[in-house]
Image: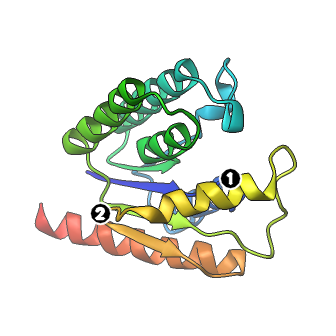
């Protein structure tokens, strides 16, 4: 079973890439891939710059449930965001050490139990419009937080053209799926 995640600051093309990568894999006859949609959009609590502990907890737990449910149905999973995103956003907003430690411990435990084979970190591109709801400064702070500490198995997507981003991700996922299939 292989699991992949698209991470990075908001408005970098992750969601659009998720659907396009899924479509490309299906065109190639790969039907064993399930897609996990971004859960934060369904959060009933304030998010982004106004994120609270309740929002982080809700998002973290729902991300884990969504990944887990999809892993039960499909051999391979691609996630729009990950538990890593939950850590980055929450720690950028909330200073409470106990709350930060709790959120981080859940994420790290989940990644030990169900690790991501490859994490694709999407970088901002001049071809993707700037976020409407949040400031450019906020986006920059989050981007810096994503690159502040090393993330295992992380591949940074820097291609400016969307088609190149998708092509790069599809190739790497195919390689990983092939490698996994050969080892079983």
Which image quarter: residue 12?
bottom right
- In front of the other: 41 or 144: 144
Residue 122 in the image: above or below residue 56: below
- The first of marks 1 and 2 along the sequence is 1
Tell me the CA gap for discs 1 and 2.
Answer: 21 Å
Q: Position of residue 6 (x, y in %)?
A: 51, 57
Local crowd at mark 2 within 10 Å, few (<14), some, or many (≥20)? Answer: few
- Judging from the image, the colouring scheme is rainbow
Q: Position of residue 69 (x, y in %)?
A: 39, 29
Q: Residue at x 68, y 77 (%)?
A: 163
Q: Position of residue 85 (x, y in %)?
A: 50, 46
Q: Can you tell which mark lies on residue 152?
A: 2
- The quadrant of the image that shows the C terminus is bottom left
Q: Is residue 120 visible?
A: no
- In front of the other: 22 or 154: 154
- In front of the other: 181 or 129: 129
The secondary element bearing badge 1 is classed as loop
Q: Is residue 123 visible?
A: yes
66 on left or right of 92: left
Residue 159 in the image: above or below residue 109: below
- In front of the other: 5 or 56: 56
- Count of numbered badges drawn on the protein: 2
**Which residue matches tag 1?**
10
Residue 58 in the image: above or below residue 64: above
Local crowd at mark 1 within 10 Å, few (<14), some, or many (≥20)? Answer: many
């Amino acid at each position: 079973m292989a699991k992949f995640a698209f991470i990075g600051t908001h408005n970098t093309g992750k969601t659009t890439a998720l659907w396009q990568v899924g479509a490309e894999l299906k065109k190639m006859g790969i039907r064993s891939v399930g897609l996990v949609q971004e859960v934060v959009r369904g959060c009933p609590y304030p998010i982004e710059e106004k994120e609270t502990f309740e929002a982080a907890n809700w998002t973290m737990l729902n991300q884990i449930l969504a990944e887990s449910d999809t892993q039960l149905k499909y051999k391979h999973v691609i996630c729009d965001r990950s538990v890593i995103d939950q850590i980055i956003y929450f720690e950028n907003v909330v200073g409470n050490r106990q709350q930060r430690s709790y959120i981080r411990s859940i994420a790290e435990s989940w990644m030990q139990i169900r690790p991501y084979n490859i994490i694709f970190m999407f970088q901002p591109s001049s071809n993707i419009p700037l976020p409407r709801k949040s400031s450019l400064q906020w986006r920059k702070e989050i981007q810096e937080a994503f690159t502040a500490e090393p993330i295992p198995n992380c591949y940074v997507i820097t291609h400016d053209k969307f088609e190149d981003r998708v092509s790069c991700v599809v190739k790497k996922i195919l390689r990983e799926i092939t490698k996994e299939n050969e080892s079983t």
